[in-house]
Image: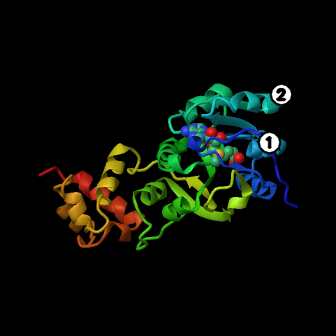
Amino acid sequence: MVEKIEYSMRAKRSLGQNFLVDGNYVSKIVNAVHPEKDEVVIEIGPGRGALTRELLERGAKVLAIELDRELVPKLRDDHGLTGRFIVVEADASEADLRELIDQFYPGTPKAKLVANLPYYISTAILQHLSAERHCLSKLVLMFQREVVERITAKPGSSERGYLTVLVEAAFAVERLFDVPPEAFRPRPKIWSSVVRLIPKAQSSADGDAFRRFLSSGFSQKRKTIANNLKRSYPEAAVALADACIDPKRRAETLELSEWLRLYDAIAVHPKP
Ligand code: SAM
């Protein structure tokens, strides 16, 4: 049965507001989150609360982060009385998740996270969530389909780039299902896709230095990895040889393990 959820308030295009109105997809997303009773789930951008409502019905404790201050009072009115709902007005791409969990649900080692995210914030939020992942056990994220194609692109695919490797270094990624434009109001032009991310343990790839290295490696898609890296890393040629990577390869052909090997090889070489 397809349940349509109707709303009257106007959506803000500048905040990427396309609200989920198809109950079947709401359930599919919440099934993927699979909240246990009293488990803490962080929801980024609850909007008009389609996912929030179902999370609460299934017994989760919800910690929502919403940037649109006009939506916050209604969310509090609708769900505040459950005693299992907190909404903070903040930009999720800057929020300190550990601090928020400790403030509102102290004693919670890890939370799950769910979000239906606008396109304009996808890179910033994925970078931020990679850095904040140690307080999370699972993330279920919906993006515009092309973003999911980018973050799940295999070595050799032209879609593979900085964001793909950054996400692979931080999470085990699984694409779950696609969502058609008809599932939203207002209706977007494009399809969306849902992915599940399971955080990986801390590694040498955490931190800004690895991001700068990756961004340098992918700086010009047509050039070889050696050419891209040599300006910022004069030791790149030696490091490529140490890591047994052909300097003529293009960045998009490298697997995550090769990026990590190359990064470690660069780190052990003193700058010439
Ligand atoms: N989760 C709701 C749903 O599925 O119907 C709303 C999804 S809508 C695509 C995106 C939501 O994220 C909106 O409510 C928007 O106001 C909010 N949002 C946009 N940028 C944000 C940010 N930087 N931090 C927190 N929320 C944000």
> Quick check: can you spot residue 268?
yes
Q: Is residue 58 left or right of residue 193?
A: right
Name the quarter where the N terminus is drawn.
bottom right
The local secondary structure at tag 2 comes to helix
Q: Earlier in the sequence, mark 1 or mark 2?
A: 1
Number of other residues with Cα within 10 Å of mark 2, as a class: few under 14, some 14 to 19, many 20 or more? few
> Quick check: can you spot residue 106?
no
- The amino acid marked with disc number 2 is Leu
Residue 193, picture quadrant: bottom right
The local secondary structure at tag 1 comes to helix
Q: Residue at x 72, y 60 (%)?
A: 182
Q: Is residue 173 left or right of residue 252?
A: right
Residue ID for mark 2: 81
Residue 178 spot, x, y in % from top left = 66, 64
Q: Quadrant of ligand 1?
A: top right
Indicate whether 143 appears above or below 44: below
Q: Residue at x 26, y 52 (%)?
A: 267
Residue 214 spot, x, y in % from top left = 34, 55
